[in-house]
Image (cartoon, grey):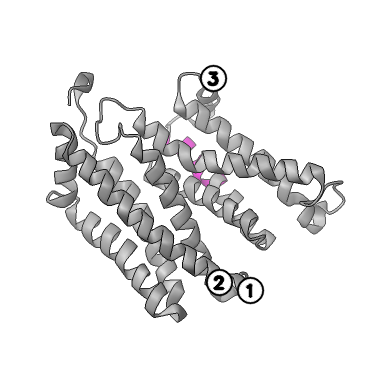
Amino acid sequence: MAIDLFLGGLGGGLFLFYELWELPVSIGLLSLGLVVVGGVVLLMELGHPWRAWRAICRPFSSWISRGVIFVLLFVVSSSLYIAPALDLFSWLPWSPLSLGGKVLGVIAGASACLVALYPGFVLSASPSIPSWNSPLLPVLFFSQSLTGASGILLLLSPLGLLNQRLEGISSLAVLLIGANFVLIAFYLMVLKKSGLAAQESVRHLSEGALSLIFKAGVILVGTVVPLLVVVWIPSAVVLAGACVLLGGLLFRYCVLKSGVYVPFAIT
């Protein structure tokens, strides 16, 4: 499950940067591809992918249903928004600057935000796992998605796709990495002051089986190293991008694995 949450969030965050910085169409296609692949991985994990259509049938009571709708809305709107930039579809009667293109851009951008947010809402709607049942989790997942998207751009920087935008993207990456660290620290602090199950989740991350992955993977490799590289060795931003992506994936893994189930939501 960590992989589909990771890929979907990356795709949503990357599309926001694609729109914000008017990046090359290849970046838009990559964002779309990440969301689609994340959706496919999720379907495979459900065990019965051909029954997945049922997932859309409960949007008023299920965040998974809402998530499916968000993904479908993003795939359709972003495809239509990107299409005129491709030679094959250059005949389409709208462009990013036309009224129709602007409307599609707004819809695609909004749905990209929702795609990046909804995994956090899926987990936070689990009262029987107190460490997931937190309003901070959607914020954390959204922040992680944006940070991961900046990591992808840093990783792709040698391809020359970013032109003069690399400096701005690097600066934003520093801010996002720092913000993520603060959010993670605050999240853990809140859990430590919560019930026993939430405290046990923190123990798993700080002392238990997940401590090495969390401390070395999420904090050191995913936070400290890329921060130092971007600030002090800007010529090695590719390394920073790779570290950010690895840290983001491991963060989701740690959140999922550290959850302690409590029947009847007894905390």
The quadrant of the rendering that contains the C terminus is: top left
Disc 3 residue crowd, few under 14, some 14–19, many 20+, Cα 10 Å: some
Which numbered disc, 1 or 3, marks the residue closer to the eye?
1
Q: Is residue 232 left or right of residue 30?
A: left
Determine which quarter of the picture holds residue 120. Answer: top left
Disc on the earlier residue, 3 or 2: 3
Gap in angstroms between the C-alphas marked 3 and 2: 43 Å
- Looking at the rendered structure, the kind of residue marked 1 is Asn
Q: Are marks 2 and 1 in contact (CB under 8 Å)?
A: yes
Most foreground residue, 44 or 93: 93
Most foreground residue, 201 or 194: 194
Give the residue number, with chain letter if any, for mark 1. Answer: 163
Q: Which mark is residue 11?
A: none
- Looking at the rendered structure, the kind of residue marked 3 is Cys
Tag 3's secondary structure?
Answer: loop
Q: Which mark is residue 166?
A: 2
- Tell me what residue is drawn at x 80 percent, y 42 percent: 100
Q: Is residue 208 left or right of residue 250?
A: left
Q: Position of residue 193 (x, y in %)?
A: 17, 38
Which numbered disc, 3 or 2, marks the residue closer to the eye?
2
Most foreground residue, 99 or 161: 99
- Looking at the rendered structure, the kind of residue marked 2 is Leu
Q: Which mark is residue 57?
A: 3
Gap in angstroms between the C-alphas marked 1 and 3: 44 Å
